[in-house]
Image (cartoon, rainbow, N blue to C red):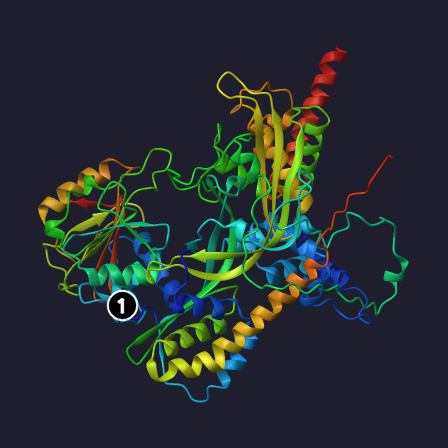
Amino acid sequence: MIVELSGFQDLIHDSQSTFKTLLDALSRPGSVNEITAQLTPPSKLNIACAAACLTLFDLETEVWLQPELDEEVKNWLLFHTGCRFTSDTQQADFAVVWNLDNMPDVSQFKQGTPVYPEDSTTLLIMVGRQEIDMPSNNYPILSGAGIDGQITMGINLSDSFWQQWQQNHNSYPLGVDVYFFFYHGVIGLPRTSYRQV
Amino acid sequence: MSPPTARQTWMAILAKSSPVDLEQQVKTLGEIPKYTFLRQSEIGLAMVRGRAGGTGEAFNLGEMTVTRCVIKMREIQGFGYVGGRSKRHAELAAVCDGLLQQNEWRDRVQELVIQPLQRKLIEHQRKQQNQTEATKVEFFTMLRGE
Amino acid sequence: MAYVAVKGGEQAIQNAEALLQAMRRGDRNLPELSLEQIKQQLALAVNRVMAEGSLYDEDLAALAIKQSWGDLVEAIFLLRAYRTTLPRLYYSKPLDTEKMQVQRRISSIFKDVPGGQKLGATYDYIHRLLDFKLAAEDNEYQPPQKPIAVNSNSVTPRSIDTLDKEQLIQSEDVRQSKREPFDLTRQSLTTPTDRDARLQNLTRADEGFLLGLAYSTQRGYGKNHPFAGEIRVGEVEVIIEPEELGFEIAIADIQVTEVQMVNQFKGSKELPPQFTRGYGLTFGYNERKAMSMALVDRALRAKEFGEEMEGVAQDEEFVLYHSDNVEAQGFVQHLKLPHYIDFQAELNLVRQMRKESNN
């Protein structure tokens, strides 16, 4: 296996600070959080998503990669994390998504069980950067645990995603949690968040 | 494991030698090419397995500490995997593995690092075997009765 | 019942720790114990801590012993806690104990075994009387040497293989193992268990607990007529196959103790009369533990062989749920923590009952 790209420059501190950022992102849904770790990711991963993968994956996690993600990504993840790959969305602890429009329905992923609701898939979705600084009327407004009243989420997502999301929210305590990544930024969308209409 | 390849042999010698001995032998190489870390030295665990009855069903015996490292030197990748928690040990093992894959370095590293370390390991093993051999029981049968 | 938080004692706790540290160090005029001294001169303690701490690392085990003031169960706890902080990077190939670099190897069922009987470093055949010469310092001992001709990684065949060839012993060949072995560091143990789960549990189990259980089987609580088929101690290679490398590599030699117990078995409807096996394997030189493990492993196979259940050592629920000294010491010792409110409630209840019975 040929891997040309290194992982974190500072393994311990970069993974700890990334982990902290990921925790913050899920604790404050909809807020924009910055991942400060430096690295050169494979071309199909953005920096934030790559840092999250290095932080969260290990020998004991099963990862589903959207089929469009190539061998370079696979080899890089395998080399640096030792994770296992699965083509079964029902088995995946994590799913890496590069094209949201082409993703299986949210309900296709592992939902957890009543005894272990945390044993569900966490979706790592890359989105192109949009005008985060200038919320428009089109941007979704979120409410739920960890949100003081409501918050405007700075990324546009399709209606079909939000339909799936409503269903995901309704099946609480089961369901998936999502991270959206763009460049250095990450936004968390836990199953407890719902869109205001 | 089928008969080890040259690379498997040197990697095992690098792993089993003491970090102190390894450091000492690497010093004798003089200046070595620059390298970067593809994967920094990292300490973790390997779950060691055994088999019921020695040959039967596998089971988890317990973990041991391991340290691994991957370096990149010119276009060559060097890998180090060593038992224990010495980051330097894993790094030096990776560096030597990288050098041994390069024609202009192979003989020199074999001569100045691998062979001396191997001799030391064999010597240690032989000493242990000789000590154990000294405790081997020689049975003799006594004639009784008559 | 209301929950009442009690605060206080902070200074006392800090001072208790400081006192422990000072007492542990002892007289400052005496040299401090080095980890290297513990590793070499208290090697069997280090081995026990590695085996029950389920982590092979002599330096860490020596540190744990020093830190725990010689309390091995506490040291085992410290090692277990430390291992949870490290990521698991690899699973090894199952150890090939036939290729062991033998340091001790005996069989009590066959006098002549291929490879011979080698006693190694053992207390077995010496007077167990206090040696007052040892109390003086500056002892020097030379290890005996007997040169051997060849120096190869020779295989030492198992002494019970001859029984296997005659099919007089239950065979142990499941090389085509169907699934990943059970891992109790990742899955919770539920009964009934398979042998892989039991062996992992037993190799981490408290030596004293296993020793008592093993003894109970010998005294008749689940009799199974054991013989020590073979005991071997020595170094074996640990081999991993990193996926990024694509081939197997040896990363270390570790010392293990392996015990093959041979037990008589009358046979059943399905099985002809034959010998059966109990297996013990531990990190380090831990012979008493490995023997106890093998006896208890065999006892726990009673159901598999359709034997009558007549002893506690055959009861997997009892054995496996009480064998771990880290769990056991935690639950027993938690009784030292304040139970003021619980006890107040019980006290009131007893007073109340007393009052009612007096009326």
Circle 1: residue type: Val
What residue is at 51 percent from the left and 61 percent from the top? C252
What residue is at 22 percent from the left and 43 percent from the top? A89
The chain to which mark 1 is attached is A
* Residue B53 seen in render: yes
Q: For mark 1, what is the residue?
A: A3
Report the quarter where the C terminus of chain C lies: top right
Element assignment for label 1: loop
The image quadrant that residue C273 belongs to is: top right
Q: Farthest residue to the top: give it.
A: C359
What residue is at 81 percent from the left and 68 percent from the top? C140
Asked whether A133 or A82 is in front, the reply is A82
Asked whether B144 or A46 is in front, the reply is B144
- Residue B65 as seen in the image, left or right of residue C50: left
Q: Is residue C325 above or below residue C167?
A: below
Classify mark 1: residues with Cα within 10 Å, few (<14), some (14-19) or many (20+): some
Report the quarter where the N terminus of chain C lies: top right
Residue B32, position as x, y percentages in the image: 40, 86
Asked whether C189 or B51 is in front, the reply is B51
Q: Farthest residue to the front: give it.
A: B146
The image quadrant that residue C151 belongs to is: bottom right
What residue is at 86 percent from the left and 34 percent from the top? B145
